Image (spheres, helix red, strand yellow):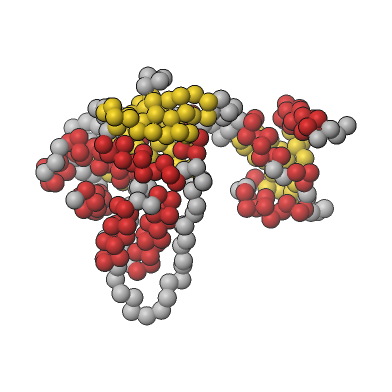
Amino acid sequence: MKLDRLLAITMSLLNQTRVSATELAERFEVSLRTIYRDMESINQAGIPIISFPGSDGGYEIMSGYRIDKQILSFDDFSAICSALRGAKSATDSSDINELLERVGALMPTRASGASDVHVDLDFKPAPNDKGKFEPLHKAIKELKVVQFNYLDNKGQETKRTIEPMGLFLKGYVWYVYGYCLTRADIRVFRLSRMLGLSSLSDTFIRRPYTLQDVEQQFMGKVNFQKVRAVLRFQPEMKTRVRDEFSYDEISDHPDGTVTVIAHYSSKERAVRSILSYSSYVMVIEPSELIEELAGHIRQMARIYNIN
């Protein structure tokens, strides 16, 4: 029933400019709280929903994501099925199996010809992620507290107890967000860094946080323009450079080398990325990044007893 309602709500949002939570609650005969959770589920599925306060407020799909045609084509259905299969490979969720069957039943028969575009989103999750989806999903549905040890960026391990509220995928990385009883605040945790996950018998009452609140509080804090670096790559890296950087950041030179103006969220991320290119890259600026990189190279030389 929930999947039916989510699909119906999504179609309502596609067909209307704005719809209020009260209107949706009355139409589907559920509580406002259920509608709020449904909106969060739709958001987590990748459809960006915006909420507007006030007397004329309500929900609508973010401009630029709305489907102009009310009738989906064969290729549209194919793309939807491919995306769902990709999510299924990551989560093994029975809900997605049911949804795939429903979407497949709605798919129109193609009169002639084959699809010109094939979408394969069957990406593999991190090895440590897959076994955590089902217990976390169950804990979220049953409002059960979970406990685990968590590794931070520096490898420090802390024991956490949280009230899990939702799972979401961002940049091919899976996260769970919830209220952390250890820190007495809302927090986001990367699944691959969670160790020894267990569900407790303690239950909780869901707090008034949404995925939008979490993204504004945490994801918005990541400043990908924090560290600016000018890098000079050898010709052997030309293909990889074009795979990983925007064209407006790349400058070609007659000798085959390539200069890139790169941006990183931290000096640590910059160093890790630059080292992955081995001796095929040289940092031109800034000087503090060159010093940091040189320090790491000296440490590596000491590990291997290189003078």
> Image height check: is 236 above or below 62?
below
| Front one among 177 and 60 | 177
**Is residue 63 at all visible to an observer of this figure?**
no
Horizontal side of 307 relative to 41 (left or right) equals right
How many marks on residues?
0
Query: Is the C terminus in the top left, top right, bottom left or bottom right quadrant?
Result: top right
Q: Position of residue 62 (x, y in %)?
A: 34, 45
Q: Residue at x 67, y 52 (%)?
A: 240
The quarter of the displayed image where residue 146 is located = top left
Residue 33: percent from the left, percent from the top?
20, 35
Q: Residue at x 37, y 61 (%)?
A: 81
Q: Is residue 236 above or below residue 281?
A: below
Q: Nearer the viewer, residue 243 or 199?
A: 199
Q: Is residue 288 left or right of residue 59?
A: right
Q: Position of residue 231 (x, y in %)?
A: 73, 40
For the question of whether residue 196 can be seen, the reply is yes
Residue at the image point whose x is 37% and y is 19% from the top: 184
In front of the other: 278 or 67? 278
Judge by depth and name the residue closer to the eye, 303 or 165.
303
Occupied quadrant, residue 226: top right
Position in image of residue 125 (x %, y %): 49, 48
Instruction: Name the residue rendered at 66%, 37% in the picture.
Output: 272
